[in-house]
Amino acid sequence: MELARIHRHRTIIEDPARFGCLCAAAALLFVANIPFWMTMAVVGITQLAPIMMAARALEQGWSRRWGPRVHPAVYASNLAMDYTNLAACTVVGALLLVRHYQGVDTVRLLAILTVAICFLPDIRLCRWLLSGDPVEASLQLRNGSILRDPVMLGALLATGGVAILDRGTLEFVFYSLIFLQFNALLVLVDKYLPEIESRRRAGWKALLLEREGRRLWLTLAPLGLIPLRLAAGDRVSWAAAAGIVVAIVLPDLLRMGQALVTGVANLFRVTPASPATYIVLPK
């Protein structure tokens, strides 16, 4: 009961970070002249992401408190929500910078993006695909496809968003990420890096190859596309985005290929007949 209460899905009304970002986006979109106090209030709202991350994990080992059977579900659900809050606060910071330097006509795209990010967890698409039982959800996260993984789906959405945004808007997102959310990135890494569950590998191999390690670096990889696209251009960044997509879907493709080969081999497998049993009757 305690696990279900602490790690349950929280709606936007219950989440201070997403609700604050939604209110800030509405204020920045509809207020003509932004006073100084509103600027400081929006900056404070953008700092809710690291505060919420730290508040949900005050000590190392927080994800192992309920045992290894539910560890993947606790790890993935918290990472998905913290990444959502980080993305929402980053976009709101970019929205604030755009208002100060370009005016109200160029903020509609960022305002729509903020609303989409804030309401995305309430759509509960992953709830329909992932079991509500923590033990069964952990098994699905260990052995299931990316369609059952909210972190991988979020990484795909973030990669697509970075790839399609125009360069002018992307510059403000980059400034917001560096000047307003750099501390949130440090908290994110410090919170989840020690919690990676490794069964067969250690060190950098666990980070790159284990499912929980892949979840962490694949959530950070779309953020690395932002400076790459600004510095190297669209073609290089699109190639890197394609590499991220391949890294996300490749385990599923390998698993499907292995299942296909096993199925074809089973079609041509000859099952030996059971040995006949003879009963000799006395004459």
Image: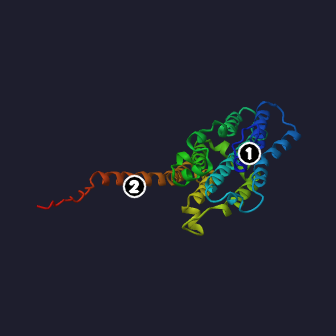
Q: Name the quadrant containing residue 269.
A: bottom left
Q: Residue at x 69, y 45 (%)?
A: 8
Residue 34 coordinates in the image, percent (x, y): 84, 36
Q: Is residue 19 above or below residue 237?
A: above
- Tell me where residue 36 appears, x and y as whole percent: 88, 41
Q: Which residue is at the front of the view, 2 or 282?
A: 282
Above or below — where is 110 with respect to 264?
A: above
| Of the pair 7 and 279, the residue shown nearer to us | 279
The secondary element bearing badge 2 is classed as: helix
What residue is drawn where x is 76% and y is 61%? 59
Residue placed at 69% from the left, 36% from the top? 115
Residue at the disc numbered 2: 258
Task: Name the image quarter holding the C terminus.
Answer: bottom left
Judging from the image, what secondary structure is the residue with disc 1 in?
Answer: helix
Q: Contact (CB < 8 A) between labels 2 and 1?
A: no
Q: Position of residue 208 (x, y in %)?
A: 56, 62
The residue beneath circle 1 is 89
Q: CA distance from mark 2 to mark 1?
A: 41 Å
Answer whether residue 101 is visible to the viewer in this image.
Answer: no
Q: Earlier in the sequence, mark 2 or mark 1?
A: 1
- Quarter-wise, where is residue 22 in the image? top right
Q: What is the residue that sits farthest to the bottom in this orientation?
A: 202
Quarter occupied by residue 84: top right
262 with respect to 164 (left or right): left
Asked if residue 112 shows in the view, the reply is yes
User: Which amino acid lies under the numbered mark 2 shown in the image of this protein?
Assistant: Gln
In the figure, is residue 197 to the left or right of 102?
A: left
Kind of residue at disc 1: Cys
